[in-house]
Amino acid sequence: MADIQVETHDHIAVVTLNRPPLNTVTDATYVQIRDVFTALGDDRDVRVAIFTGAGDRAFCAGIDLSSPNPTPRSERHPRELTDAGHIVRASMWAIVDCAVPVIGAINGYALGIGLAYAACCDMLVASDNAKFATPEINVGLLGASAHLSLMMGRHKAREMHFTGEQVSAQEMHRIGAVRTVTTPNKLMDTALELAGTLAAKSPIAMRLAKEVMNRIEHLELREGYRTEQDYTTRLMRFDDSREARRAFRENRDPQYKWE
């Protein structure tokens, strides 16, 4: 794919947005992001994904306003004509709904839709030069306020949405949105180390854990916990679940077989 590169090693897929100089996105990029993350969920060999940007200037600095739309209106799918935001949302939900956990490795700017993509990831690590913002209000648009609200509390989300100000990786770490802040040259090693921890767990358990957390995220406590109990019952029917308990009792590494 022109804008997206995917490499898979040791059950970890590294998805790299590569549109220099600032990894801005176009309609074609949305389609590629949608297709890549959908396909990763269907790949049994993939247990975790890392989403990052090429270079160290930007994870994704937003929409490429200088690029003409590559698809003439006459050739667009009818849904895209009647709902212009459809393909943008589809690229986001592909990350959210990807069957495996997605770690965002944020190198440099995460602006506008770049911040939205970061928010759609399950966990974030960031370089110490990373900046997060929804600057749309400064150019007469509205930004990803719903995504801001996933990452932080009400007042900080409104502050960022109303002002468009850039927030440092260190501040995002302080408020709990970013797990680790490191130097740019250590970012991918940090992300890979975290990914390796997740990839060592039962792939069936991890996929069910991702699915149930998506389902209960906005439920009230009683319904959410009941749903989680149902998923636990499903997981316990798999031999991989029994293998995890056997390995714990025998003080050894588990051998998962997708059974």
Image (tube, rainbow, N blue to C red):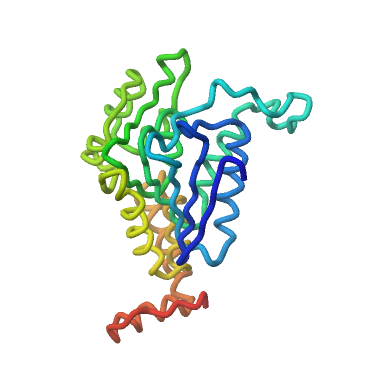
Q: How many marks?
A: 0
Image coords of residue 124 (percent x, y):
35, 46
Q: Is residue 103 above or below residue 67?
A: below
Residue 219 appears in the figure: no
Image quadrant assignment for residue 147: top left
What residue lies at 59% left-to-right and 29% top-to-bottom? 85
Question: As rendered, which of 159 and 186 lies closer to the eye?
Answer: 186
Residue 46 appears in the figure: yes
Q: Where does the N terminus fall, quadrant-wise? A: top right
The residue at the far right in this view is 74
Question: As rendered, which of 236 and 110 lies closer to the eye?
Answer: 110
The residue at the far bottom in this view is 250
What residue lies at 40% left-to-right and 58% top-to-bottom? 226
Image quadrant assignment for residue 230: bottom left
What residue lies at 56% left-to-right and 21% top-to-bottom? 66
Image coords of residue 231 (percent x, y):
45, 64
Question: As rendered, which of 135 and 93 lies closer to the eye?
Answer: 135
Image coords of residue 40 (percent x, y):
55, 56
What residue lies at 52% left-to-right and 78% top-to-bottom? 259
Q: Is residue 148 above or below residue 246?
A: above
The residue at the far left in this view is 174
Q: Is residue 86 left or right of residue 163?
A: right
